Amino acid sequence: MSAHFKALETAVSFIETHLQDDITIGDIAAAAAYSLYHFCRIFNQSAHHPPYDYLMRRRLSAAAEQLNQDDTRIIDLAFTYQFGSPESFSRAFRRMFGVLPSQWRQQGTCDPRVLMKPLSHGHLVQRNHSDFQRPTPVRKDEFSVAGLMTVVGQEGETAVSHLQRRFNQYPSHNLVTIRHYPDFWAEQGKPVLAGVLSETAALPFVLQTIPAHTYACFALPAVAEERPFLSDYIYQTWLPQSQYKLAAPFELEQARQLFIPIKPDL
Amino acid sequence: MEPRFITRDALHLVGFSFYGDPFRLSPGWTEENEIGRLWVRFAAYAEQRRDQLADLVVNPRIAYEVHIYNEETMTTGLFEVFVGAELAKGAQPSLDTLVKVLPAVQYAVFTLRGEEIVGDWPLAIYQEWLPQSAYEMAHHFHIQYHDGSFKGFDRLSESSLDVYVPVKLRS
């Protein structure tokens, strides 16, 4: 597998330096020193993306970031990122992000979870663990959590751990952490509630009730540093390829599992 | 990797086809990817018509997996895979099958053995052997010829597989 990883890292690096160039999957396979056929198989196997899908998502993500950073005209971005026409750029953009490039720019902010990041060695390791499993949908009835809430920035997982430790005396299967992702979370942080399953809450605790949902359930990595790779896998790879979309903007952590509320993408 | 050469008349195959990235669902050597699904469909079709198969195909024990590249393939990685058997002369294939006609051509035939079958043999053929040979590609497809020598991915060490690459002398 390590030989494959090395080749794929070469391929990813080649893609990154040629996002704005007219490259083909054949060129990328050649950079990785594989035949096109073998490269497509290996890339799908290790990255969980068809290579062309990954190239398009990287181009669209780079274009999306640029839309919010400068005033480059949309027509110029379309040609810069090799979409051939503003129409095909807009179509692909809306397919990936659900809005047109002009609407994206107007919003001026975005949920960074949906931007495809360049695949790193860490991403490949996370996706190729021997115990890696795709999620299965599970149903959870309405429940309530009594706990403490804080707002944390993108680098705020330490604060979350600190909150979680406040409830260490409770049985671990009753401990729940809810991370909310409102529209403004990238700029202003995400509200996080850590607590225990409970019907009531006495001060200083707050009570939050989560309605019944269907969730995609993922095993949390044993190593905390791998958690961002799981998040990238969920939002950038699994969700777009699944037949689901997000049902609500929060994540639930319980018993070493991460639950993402989903609904069918009709 | 040295081939032997044969020339074949136009080949009429009856079977099933897929176009796209066949490894999108599952990249492994399993029935879960689109190539595996084609084989499952073809096997089920052959089983359902076991009694008529001798009239429909030239040799029910020989099957073909054909990978066909087009102008888009190098750009997108998408290609066609066809799995089928050689259609008998005058036979009428049913509506749920497709017929693929491969042109009369000379083939370089490479025999892959054991682990070579799951290795990067296209690289060895197209980027190592071909540029050093007196030949060039005649068409953008190749055939995996299944005559029973391939015993399955769980018995690779006992297996061999012939790959037919259409070639012509370099002009």
Image (cartoon, coloured by chain):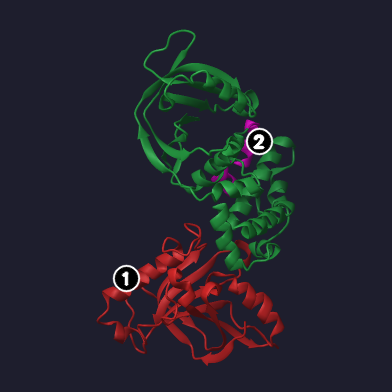
Chain colours: A green, B red
Question: Residue A133 at what x, y percent from top left?
Answer: 46, 47
- At 51% across and 21% down in the image, what residue appears? A193
Q: Which residue is mark 2?
A: A105
Which mark's residue is nearer the viewer, 2 or 1?
A: 1
Instruction: Determine whether B92 is above or below A140 in the image.
Output: below
Q: Is residue B85 left or right of residue B8?
A: left
Label 2 SS: helix
- At 55% across and 44% down in the image, what residue appears? A233
The chain holding disc 2 is A
Instruction: Determine whether A178 is above or below B156 in the image.
Output: above
Question: Residue B159 at what x, y percent from top left?
Answer: 47, 77
For the residue carrying disc 2, how many other residues have a C-alpha within 10 Å: few (<14), some (14-19), or many (20+)? many
Q: How far apart are the alpha carbons under marks 2 and 1?
A: 52 Å
Label 1 SS: helix
* The N terminus of chain B lies in quadrant: bottom right
Q: Which residues are magenta?
A: A91-109
Q: Is residue A246 left or right of residue A70?
A: left
Report which quarter residue B41 is drawn in.
Answer: bottom left
Q: Residue furthest front?
A: A169
The circle on residue B44 is 1
- At 65% across and 65% down in the image, what residue appears? A26
Q: Are marks 2 and 1 on the same chain?
A: no
Q: Nearer the viewer, residue A108 or A135?
A: A135
The majority secondary structure of the magenta stretch comes to: helix
Three-letter residue code for mark 1: Ala
The chain holding disc 1 is B
Three-letter residue code for mark 2: Arg
Report which quarter residue A171 is drawn in.
Answer: top left
Q: Nearer the viewer, residue A200 or A165?
A: A165
Question: Residue A225 at what x, y percent from top left?
Answer: 61, 37
Residue A100 is a magenta residue: yes
For the residue carrying disc 1, how many other residues have a C-alpha within 10 Å: few (<14), some (14-19), or many (20+)? few
